[in-house]
Amino acid sequence: MAEPIMLVNSVLNGYRVLSKIIECPETVLYRGVNEQNLHEVAIKMLLPHVARKGYLIRQLKREARYEGKLSHPSIIKGRGFFRRPARHHFIMDYFPSKSLRFRLMDEDDDIVRTYMRKIMIEMADALAYVHDMGLVHRDIKPENVLVNSAGDTKLIDFALASRYDLISRMFVRGRRVQGTRSYMSPEQIRNKPLDNRADIYSFGAMLFEMVVGHPPFTGSSEAEILRRHLTDFIRPIKRFKENVSPAFDGLVQAMLAKSPSGRPSTMHEVADTLKSVSIFVDEETDAGFEPESMHEQQ
C-alpha cells in the first residue's frame, strides 16, 4: 500500500482529517470535520500519480461545481473545489452509508430488498430535479448511489455530467465517449448528442439489475456488452423473476428502448409511475404502465 497523501489528524482548508474511507485507482476519499462548526465532510482527492492529468482535474472540478449548485435531499451536497499542488480535492457533505453496488454484492445485506421501492423513487425524483436543472448525469450506476441503513439515498459523482442545451449539444463530437459500459445508452455509445433520456436508459438498466441481480446486458468483453446495447432487445424481467408486476416490467422495458423516442419522455413520468405501481405482483396496484414499445420489442 502506498504512503497516504493525507495523514489522519492533519488539517486541510480548515478540515481535520479523521480517517480514510476508500482508495480507488485515481482518487482517495477521506472523512473529515470542520474544526469551527464540527460539520462532517468527505474529502475526495486525486492520487499523486494522476494529480497532473488535466482531464481528471476538470472532472473533479466539474463534480464540485455541479454538486455545489444542486440542492436536493437525495443528491450529495458539494462544499467546494480546491486546487493545490499534487493535492487537488473536492469537499462534500459526509453521508454514512454504502454504495448500492456494495449492497447488491453482499448477499447478507437486506437493505435493498427491504427498501427497494423507496430507493427507486428517491433516485427518480433526484434525477428529475437534475434534468430540470438542464443537466444530464451521464453515469447512472449502482456505484454512484449511496444508501444508508434506513434506505435513504444520495446521488453522487457528477464528474461526467453535462448540460444538454442547444449550444452544449453542438460540441458533443469533440468529447470522448465516456460512461460505464453496462449502463450506457445506445446514443451515448455512438457519441451522439444526449438529453435526459440517456439517463432514463441508464436508470432503467439499474432498476433491472436491482430486481434481477445483474445488468440487462452482459458479455465476455466490453465490446460485446456495447454491441448488445446497440442491437439486442431486453428480455422481460418476468423471465428472470416470475413475481415481478407487468406494470413495472413494462416500465423498465420502455426505459431501455433503443431509440430515445421510445422511452418515457421525462424522469418525472418515470417517478410518477414508480409511485403508482408495485414492483412485485403480491403488492400489485390498479395502476399500470404498458408502453407500445414493449410490444414491439417482444
Image (tube, grey):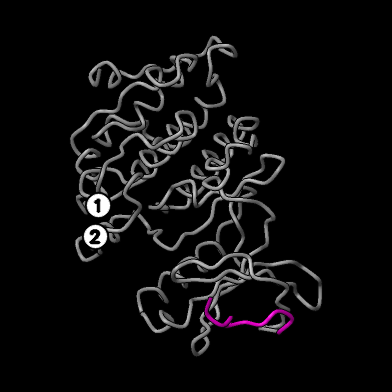
- Give the residue at x 51% y 38%: 124
Q: Which residue is mark 1?
A: 193
Q: Is 60 in the magenta? A: no
Instruction: Label 1, secondary structure: give it.
Output: loop
- Give the residue at x 62% y 60%: 77
For this orientation, the residue located farthest to the top is 286
Q: Mark 2: give few (<14), some (14-19) or many (20+) Cα within 10 Å.
A: some
**Label 2 near label 1: C-beta < 8 Å?**
yes
Q: Amino acid at mark 2?
A: Val
Quarter location, residue 3: bottom right
Front residue of this view, candidates 33 and 70? 33
- Give the residue at x 23% y 45%: 226
Front residue of this view, candidates 31 and 106? 106
Is 21 left, or right, of 286 in this rendering?
right
Where residue 216 appears, as percent x and y from the top left, is 35, 34
Q: Which residue is mark 2?
A: 172
User: What segment is highlighted magenta in the picture?
Assistant: 1-10
**Quarter in which the C terminus is drawn:** top left
- Give the residue at x 24% y 28%: 233
- Residue at mark 1 to residue at mark 2: CA–CA distance: 6 Å
Instruction: Label 2, secondary structure: give it.
Output: helix
Where residue 296 appears, as percent x and y from the top left, is 23, 19
Does residue 104 lie above or below 2 as drawn? above
Front residue of this view, candidates 31 and 285? 31
